Amino acid sequence: MSKELLNKHTAGVLGAVINQPHWKKDELSNNLKKVLVDMRENSGSPENYLDTLLRNVTFLFENTNRALSLLKFCVEEEKFMTQESFQQAMLEVPKLVKETNFFAENMPRFKELVYKGSTMEEQVTHGEFVYCNSKLVNDMVIDFIGTFLHPNNREFTINFMEYASVVMVETVMEFCKTYSSHMLKELNSME
């Protein structure tokens, strides 16, 4: 299969994913705002809030990478794992993060990404954007893989197995980032 066909199939699956009710603009916007308000209120100060955003972004990157590595494994092995196995593997991420020095080792890598701006207000605004983008990309990747693994979709998603795993995973990630960026622009224009 060609790269164009892979793009078309990826866009088709993601199109089906984002047509789910929880991806509707109003619900998505309300959910993101609620999460940010909860984080802000539980933080106590703008500095702590930025730190909370950084922690969450760091976790989301790890969660997304874990999901993509499982997708890559499926494509390399040309075998579908069950949705239950996928969900169980994803439940291991918070345990791994909690039981190791994960945040101490990884948060510095993301600090430059989150803490942009010359004032605290600019940094918070930027940090919220990075968090929302990371959250949307992560959730889209998870939903894509759930759709990919669903037994009713295998007749179609078996086509993805024809690609090199790296190419397939990079394509999915590219599309998720693009869709997330468009969604955030739309959500910001609604405000």
Image (tube, rainbow, N blue to C red):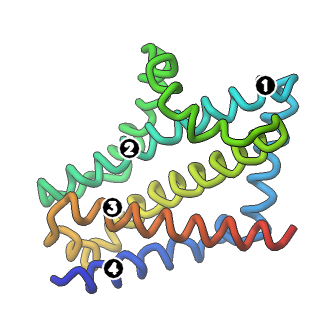
Q: Position of residue 10 (x, y in %)?
A: 36, 75
Q: Which is more foreground, mark 2 or mark 3?
A: 2
Mark 1 or mark 3, earlier in chain: 1
Which amino acid type is shown beneath numbered disc 1?
A: Glu
Q: Which is more foreground, mark 4 or mark 3?
A: 4
Which amino acid type is shown beneath numbered disc 2?
A: Asn
Per the image, the residue denoted by label 2 is: 65
Which amino acid type is shown beneath numbered disc 3?
A: Leu
Per the image, the residue denoted by label 4 is: 7
Mark 4 or mark 1, earlier in chain: 4
Q: Quadrant of residue 152?
A: bottom left
Q: CA distance from mark 2 to mark 1?
A: 27 Å
Q: Residue at x 22, y 64 (%)?
A: 167
Q: CA distance from mark 4 to mark 2?
A: 20 Å
Q: Residue at x 76, y 64 (%)?
A: 27
Which amino acid type is shown beneath numbered disc 4?
A: Asn
Q: Which is more foreground, mark 2 or mark 1?
A: 1
Q: Quadrant of the C terminus?
A: bottom right
* Label 1 Cα crowd, 10 Å radius (few <14 / some 14-19 / many 20+): few
Disc number at residue 66?
none
Q: CA distance from mark 4 to mark 1?
A: 41 Å
For mark 3, give the secondary structure. Answer: helix
Q: Position of residue 130 (x, y in %)?
A: 63, 48
Marks 4 & 1, CB-CB < 8 Å contact: no
Q: Position of residue 32 (x, y in %)?
A: 74, 52
Q: Which is nearer the eye, 36 or 104?
A: 104
Q: Residue at x 54, y 54 (%)?
A: 139
Q: CA distance from mark 4 to mark 3?
A: 18 Å
Residue 9 lies left or right of residue 28; in this view the side is left
Disc number at residue 47?
1
Per the image, the residue denoted by label 3 is: 149
For mark 2, give the secondary structure. Answer: helix
